[in-house]
């Protein structure tokens, strides 16, 4: 599996989230979206420093989410796909698209928003975004798309609740608007090989253990 990840720059793991964790995380993610959607554009104390449609450092808004972010299964994924024995926490983000919400992500790679994009491209450190799929994501909901490094083509990734899509921090990815009448929910758990937090308004930088 790690070979596929390294070749493609991402991997889609199916039906790997514990059902109880999935149900709780989905509830908390959607609750946070509804609670903070009216705060968009206002300042906040960490993450980017501003509330927007996505909620980074989500477990600082709901500490119970930290249990999902640091679940033993996520530790194993972080070790495996970062290929280190001592990964670090960096950021957890709730990305919920409400029905017919014009909430899109243009093509980007996660490391471009970090403190050292050039270092990330050189391989000085590595990050992975483990996207926990909390609701079924058919095409009309705006699922993830990743630029496959092996084929150099965009792969659309309709996914099912319980899946995890792991994306390398240097892999281009995007998503379109949710044009359906259903909620589209994802919980993005980002881990790194080195402590890279404590910039801007603050992110995690402790060992994941």
Image (cartoon, rainbow, N blue to C red):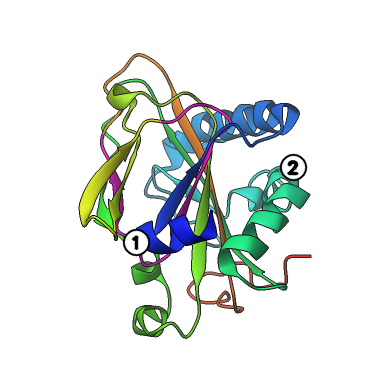
- The answer to which quarter of the image holds residue 14 is top right
Q: Position of residue 105 (x, y in %)?
A: 29, 47
Residue placed under numbered mark 1 in the picture: 171
Say if residue 14 shows up in the picture.
Answer: yes
Q: How many residues crowd around disc 2 within 10 Å: few (fewer than 14), some, or many (20 or more)? A: some
Mark 1–mark 2 Cα distance, whole angstroms, equals 29 Å
Q: Which residues are magenta?
A: 159-176
Q: Is residue 209 left or right of residue 108?
A: right
Quadrant holding the C terminus? bottom right
69 in the magenta segment = no
Up-down relation of residue 35 to residue 46 (above or below): above
**Residue at x 65% of width, y 70% of height:** 88
Of the pair 99 and 134, the residue shown nearer to us = 134
Up-down relation of residue 85 to residue 25 (above or below): below
User: Dot 2 lies on which element?
Assistant: loop
Q: Position of residue 20 (x, y in %)?
A: 74, 27
Residue placed under numbered mark 2 in the picture: 64
- The answer to which quarter of the image holds residue 35 is top right
């Amino acid at each position: 599996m790690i070979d596929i990840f390294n070749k493609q720059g991402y991997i889609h793991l199916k039906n790997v989230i514990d059902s109880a964790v999935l149900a709780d995380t989905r509830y908390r993610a959607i609750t946070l979206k509804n609670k903070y959607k009216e705060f968009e554009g206002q300042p906040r104390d960490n993450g980017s420093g501003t509330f927007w449609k996505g909620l980074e450092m989500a477990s600082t808004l709901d500490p119970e989410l930290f249990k999902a972010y640091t679940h033993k299964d996520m530790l194993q994924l972080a070790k495996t796909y970062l290929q280190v024995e001592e990964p670090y926490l960096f950021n957890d983000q709730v990305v919920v698209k409400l029905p017919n919400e014009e909430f899109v992500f243009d093509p980007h790679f996660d490391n471009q928003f970090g403190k050292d994009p050039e270092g990330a491209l050189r391989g000085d450190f590595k990050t992975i975004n483990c996207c926990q799929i909390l609701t079924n994501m058919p095409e009309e909901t705006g699922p993830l798309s990743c630029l496959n490094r092996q084929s150099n083509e965009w792969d659309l990734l309709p996914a099912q609740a319980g899946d995890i899509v792991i994306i390398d921090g240097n892999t281009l990815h995007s998503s379109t608007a949710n044009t359906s009448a259903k909620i589209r929910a994802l919980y993005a758990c980002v881990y790194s090989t080195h402590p890279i937090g404590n910039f801007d308004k603050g992110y995690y930088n402790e060992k994941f253990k």
